[in-house]
Image (cartoon, grey):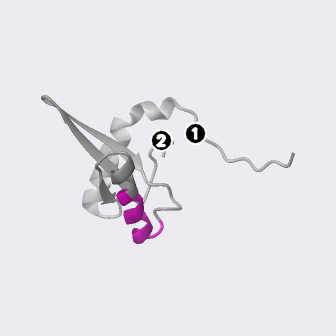
């Protein structure tokens, strides 16, 4: 969820309206959850219940690709953050 947006199958799009400012936040659905539509929809349901209202966008359509490009551009600051890394270490 915190890694830079690369090529997810699903995006969570949050829109907030503060006075005259509209803000859109994008979050990539993790790959393991986004493999099946049912899992992604359940994740969205839990997100809406616990975090904030959002909508799910499938990025394998032309409209979804456009939204993915917007998400990558608006998350430009994430490029400077080191990507998380999974380690398997015996101790």
Q: CA distance from mark 1 to mark 2?
A: 7 Å
Q: Is residue 24 above or below residue 56?
A: above
Depth order, front residue of 30/49: 49
Q: Is residue 27 left or right of residue 79?
A: left
Residue 71's disc is none
Labels 1 and 2: the sequence-earlier one = 2
Q: Is residue 50 above or below residue 74?
A: below
Residue 11: x, y in percent? 37, 53
| Residue numbers of the magenta segment | 35-45
Specify the farthest residue to the right: 91
Specify the farthest residue to the front: 49
Residue drawn at (27%, 61%) of the image = 62
Residue drawn at (49%, 62%) of the image = 33
Quadrant in which the C terminus is drawn = top right
Magenta stretch: dominant secondary structure: helix
User: Dot 2 lies on which element?
Assistant: loop
Question: Do callouts 1 and 2 mark residues in contact (Cβ within 8 Å)?
Answer: yes
Residue 44: x, y in percent? 36, 58
Q: Is residue 1 above or below residue 41?
A: above
Residue 64: x, y in percent? 29, 57
The residue carrying mark 1 is 83
Residue 37: say if magenta. yes
Q: Is residue 86 above or below residue 18?
A: below
Badge 2 density bin: few <14, some 14–19, many ≥20, Cα 10 Å: many
The residue carrying mark 2 is 4
Depth order, front residue of 2/66: 2
Picture quarter containing residue 43? bottom left
Q: Is residue 80 left or right of residue 51?
A: right
Residue 88: say if magenta. no
Q: How many discs appear?
A: 2
């Amino acid at each position: 969820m915190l890694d830079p947006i690369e090529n997810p199958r699903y995006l969570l799009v949050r829109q907030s309206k503060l006075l005259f400012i509209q803000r859109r936040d994008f979050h990539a659905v993790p790959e393991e959850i986004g493999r099946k539509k049912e899992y992604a929809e359940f994740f969205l349901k839990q997100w809406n219940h616990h975090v904030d209202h959002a909508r799910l966008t499938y990025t394998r359509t032309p409209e979804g690709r456009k939204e993915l490009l917007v998400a990558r551009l608006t998350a430009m600051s994430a490029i400077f953050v080191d990507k998380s890394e999974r380690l398997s270490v015996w101790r």
